[in-house]
Amino acid sequence: MRHYAVFYAFYLFLFFSHTLMAQEEKRVLIIDSYPKNFKWSNEIILGIKDVLAKSNIDADVIYMSGKAATSKDDYTTLRNLLEIKLKHTRYDLIIPVDKHAYTFLLRHYYDFFVNERILFSSMDFFSYEDALKQGLANKISGVFRERAIEDNIRIIQTMIPSLKKLYILNEKNPEDKTNISIKNTLDAMRLKCEVEYIGDLSLQEMREKFSTFIPDEAILFIPFYGGNYDQFYKNYKIAFTIDMFEIPVFATDSFFITRGIVGGKSILTYKLGETTGEMAREIMRNPSVPNKIITDANHEYIFNHEKINKFKLEPFLLNQSLRFVNTPVRFLDKHKKYVDAILLILPLLILLILALIHNIYMRIKDEKKYRESELQKNKHQQFIIQQSKLAEIGEVFSSIAHQWKNPLVEITALVQKHAFSVGSAFDEKNNKYINDIMVQVRYMTDTINSFQAFIMPSTTKIVFDVNEAIETMMSIISHTIKYNYIDVKIDISHATNLMVLGYKNEFMQTLLNIVNNSKDQIMHQREAKKIKRGLISIVVYNHAHTVIIEISDNAGGIPEEKLPYIFDAYYTTKEHGHGIGLYMSKIILENKMNGKIKADNTPEGARFTITLGNVS
C-alpha cells in the first residue's frame, strides 16, 4: 500500500511539473517590420512584452528592414532568421507589427508554421479576402491603430482659423491604403482650403519647398519611412528635414514630437503595445477564444512648446487636456542635484534656525525682563528720592512752622492781655477787632498744621476717603485758586464708596500736580485773553468696584502731538518746567497704588482720568 502511495505522489509531481513547465514554456514570436533601433515599433514591442511578462510568457523578436520582403535577398534573410528561431523553439502565437511583417507572414505563413495563430498590431487596414485566399482567415486577430486624421485637421483649423492651404505628407505606396482613407476623410469634411499631397517628394525637395514661411499654411504629417526611390529614410534624416520647415507641421503620431513637429492628437504607441499584449495574453490563456479585430483608441494631445512659440499658436483653444514637450528647463529642474542636496539638509537647517530663533527670543525676553526690573527699580528709587525730598522739606517746614507758631502764640497772648487790661472799657468795636485777630491767628495756625501734615511723606499704605483728600488738597490752594479767578466744582453725587488703599499724602500731591497744571494753563489763557474766567471740574464716581476721578479744565487742552509723551520723565510743555510732576504722579498711582492715569482732551480743555480700586 505504501508503494502505491509513493507511486501516486510521484505521478502527481510529474503531472504538475509538466503543467508548470508547459505554462512557463509558452512563447510568442514578434516580427517587427522595422530595424531594431526603430523607436516607433520598439515602443509597441515594449508594451507587448511588459504585459506578457506579467503572465510569465516569453517573447522573441526578429526584425525586418522596413520594406516589404518581396526581393529574393529580403526573403532569404528572413527565412534564415526564422529557421534559426524555429529550430529549437515552438511558438504559440505570431505577432507581426505593422504592414510589412503582416504582408510577409500572409504570403509565407505555411513555409514556417502549421497551426499557430496570428495577432497583427499597428495596422490601418485588414483584408478578409486576402486572408481567406491564403487560408488564414480562421487564424487571424488584430489591433488597428487609429490615426486621428479628421481630429488633427480640426486641430489645425482651430489653431489656424484662416487656413488657406493644407499639405498632406504621407507615403505614396501602391499597397498603402492610408491615402484612400485620407482622401475619403477630406472629401467628407468638405474643406474650404486648398489641399496638396506631397508624399512623392524627396526629403531634399521638401526642405527646399518649405524653407520660407507662408502664413495660413500647414502640413499634416502621417509618418512615412520611404521615398519615391523606395529607399528607407533614417529617423534622424526625417526629423532633421521636418525641423527645417518654416511652416507648422502637425502629426498623427508623436514619434517626432521633440524633433520638429508642432504636435497634434497622437497615437500612444506604448499603449497600443499594451492593448496588443492584453489580447495576446487572452489568446494564450484560452486558445479557443474567437478571432477578433479591435481598434486601439488611446490618444493624447501632445505639443512641442518650442514650435508653438515659434509659430505663435494657441493650443489652449482646443479646450483639451494637453501635454507639452521641450518646455523651458525650470531653475529647479536645471539644478535638481543641488535642490535635492538642499532639501536633504533643509530639516537640519530649519532645526538650527529654530534653535537660534529660540535662543534670540529667550535673550530678548531676558533682556526685556532685566530692563523692566531696572525700570521698576529706577521708579522705586525715584519714589524714595521724592519721599526723601518731601521728608527734608517737611523737616525744614516743621522748623519754620515752629518758629511761626511762637509769634502767633505771642500775638494771641497780647490780644488776650489787652482785652483783660481794658476791663469794663472793652466795647463792642474792640471786641470785633479782637475776634478778627483771633480768627486769623487760628486760620494761620490751621494752615500751617495742614501744610505740615501734607508735606510729610506717607510711611505705609492706609485706607482713606478720596473726597476728604480732595477737600484737604483744595483747602491748601484755595486762596491761590480764588485770587486767579478760577472756579472749582467738585461733584461726588454719583459716588457711593470713595474708600481706597494707598499713600494719602502722595495721592494729594498727585491731585495738586494736576490742578496746578490746570491753574497755570488757565492763567496763560487769561493773559492771552482767550477766556475771562477759569473753571476746574472734579467729578468722582464709582464704576465696577473702582473709584474714578476726572479732573478737567477750560484752558484749551494739550496739543495732540504731545499727548503720548506728557507722562514721560523730564518732558514738559512749560517754558520753565522740570517735567517731573506728571511723571511722579504716574509712578505713585500706577506703581504704588495699582491704579491708572490717562490724559485726553475735551472740547473745552484737558482731562485727566484717575482709576483706583475700591476698598469695601
Image: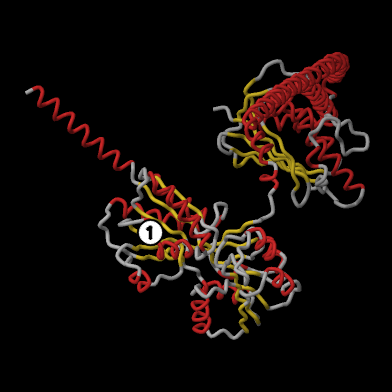
Residue 84: image location, x then y, percent: 44, 47
Q: Where the N terminus falls, by quadrant? A: top left
Q: Is residue 180 above or below residue 260?
A: below
- Residue 254: in sight, yes or no? yes
178 relative to 385 in the view: left or right = left
Q: Where the C terminus falls, by quadrant? A: top right
Residue 121: image location, x then y, percent: 43, 61
Quarter where residue 571 is shown: top right
Quarter where residue 595 is shown: top right
Q: Is residue 167 above or below residue 484?
A: below
Q: Which of 545 and 88 lies nearest the eye of the viewer?
A: 88
Residue in the image at 57% along x and 27% along y: 615
Could you tell me the amino acid type at mark 1? Asp
238 relative to 187 in the view: left or right = right
Residue 305: image location, x then y, percent: 66, 60
Q: Which of 85 and 381 lies nearest the eye of the viewer?
A: 85
427 relative to 61 in the view: left or right = right
Give the residue at mark 1.
111
Q: Residue furthest left?
A: 1
Quarter where residue 327 is shown: bottom right
Q: Which of 443 and 292 lies nearest the eye of the viewer?
A: 292
Residue 293: image location, x then y, percent: 36, 65
Q: Is residue 570 above or below residue 110?
A: above
Residue in the image at 27% along x and 54% along y: 287
Q: Which of 562 and 56 lies nearest the eye of the viewer?
A: 56
584 relative to 278 in the view: left or right = right
- Residue 421: in sight, yes or no? no
**Secondary structure under the numbered disc 1 in the rendered image:** helix
Q: Is residue 538 above or below residue 589?
A: below
